[in-house]
Amino acid sequence: MENKDLINDYMSLKQVSDANPFTVPAGYFDDLADRIVSRKNLDELKNNTPSEGFTVPENYFEELTANIQSRIAIENAVNEEGMGFTVPDGYFDNLEQQIKSRILVEDALGAPVEHFTVPQDYFEQLNKSILDKTVKANKNGIIIKLFASASFKYATAACFALVIGGGILLNELTNSPVNDHKNSFLHKQLSSVPINDIKSYLQLNDDAGDTQQTVVTEGAPVDEKNLKNALQNYLDSVQ
Amino acid sequence: MPIEVEDAEILSKFQDEKTRNEAFNILLKKYQQKIYWHVRRMVIDHDDADDLVQDVFIKVWKNLAGFRNDAQLYTWMYRIATNECITFLNKKKQKNNISLDDVAYELADTLADSTYFNGDAAQRKLQEALLTLPEKQKLVFNMKYYDDMKYEEISQVLGTSVGALKASFHLAVKKIEAHLLSKD
């Protein structure tokens, strides 16, 4: 072949092996086709959907340049507004020292003291006198309240106290256990029960603990010396 | 193993929308290694070559429907790959604001540091010599020496006359020889 014949004239070149000295990662060509196809598909997708699915408002890009320029102008104007105010020369250079000096002076003088004074109880009376002269002022004459004096109020309070105290004392003196009982709910309920029924109930349901009370209720004399015989005699009499 | 399907059949399948993807897959399997090595010898670095190979086949996909059969399919793809390599190297030069010679020095450094080069010392010297050649001379040499392409096919790839290609190849070989001898 003409290619190789030419090489024969160049010994140094001919001595070099014509084998491919370059290598590739293992399995490179096994998946190269698939990778190219994938990339091809992605490329097609991109070309078929230039906006990548996203949309913008109508005339967005036509107005975008003007909008950006307007915003830049506005931001520049806003930043420049603060430049309209000025301060005296060296103001910020001395500001810190001035503040510190003032703090020292105020600390030395102590808490601020008001030098103006007012009459005693002035503020307590101020509100009242204003109202008297404005809202409460009456052209027909001065109105004096009948029951405004403090003495009358104390007298009234004392009367109430006497009445209430008297009532409590009276109640204490007239009250007795008997009256308490008469006023009790139990007494009122028992009053409506016939006395014979009460006797029958007691006789049927009494026990040793109730015997003395039953005997007291019956009014029978109690012979303390022969209590046992007396009790037996009594029981025999009621059976 | 490359798939042996005739280019005419691939083109025919590609014209039909239903079989277009299948045709493209066949095309990929058939030419991916050829295109890859053509690109790799130009840019040296595997990752750069990988990116460029994908770019080449994307362009093939986009333009294959308009292929006019006035050249062979693989020379047409070689042309796309060659243009991509030249564009890449020019961008490299512009990006780093360096001359084409400096680009060659950069590629030589890449070769020296490459983990995907297992040639012997002589082969390394040959590659270094190739990097000193102008890009078109290097392309001619690579397609002649490594791909064993005919001048007519190289002419279709580079758009240069056969006579000029022969002269270019001769010059390339002489320069390489001189370089190899000077290193000894």
Image: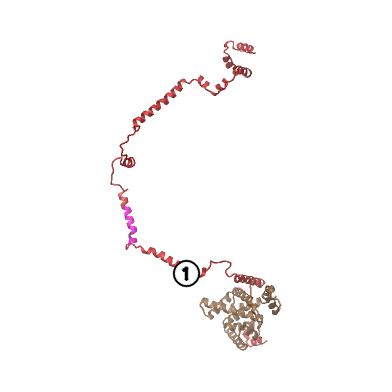
Chain colours: A red, B brown
User: Is residue B19 rendered to the left or right of residue A190?
Assistant: right
Q: Which residues are magenta?
A: A89-104
User: Majority secondary structure of the magenta segment?
Assistant: helix
Q: Which residue is mark 1?
A: A66
The three-letter amino acid code for the residue at tag 1 is Ala
Toward the viewer: A229 or B13? B13
Above or below for A207 versus A90: above
Residue in view at x 51 percent, y 70 percent: A62
Q: Position of residue A131 (x, y in %)?
A: 33, 41
Secondary structure beneath label 1: helix
User: Is residue A85 rendered to the left or right of residue A10?
Assistant: left
Residue in view at x 38 percent, y 27 percent: A158
Q: Position of residue B183 (x, y in %)?
A: 57, 82
* Protein chain holding label 1: A
| Count of picture labels | 1
Above or below for A238 versus B108: above
Toward the viewer: B25 or A202? A202
- Quarter holding the N terminus of chain B is bottom right
Toward the viewer: B12 or B134? B12
Q: Is residue B174 magenta?
A: no
Toward the viewer: A105 or B21? B21
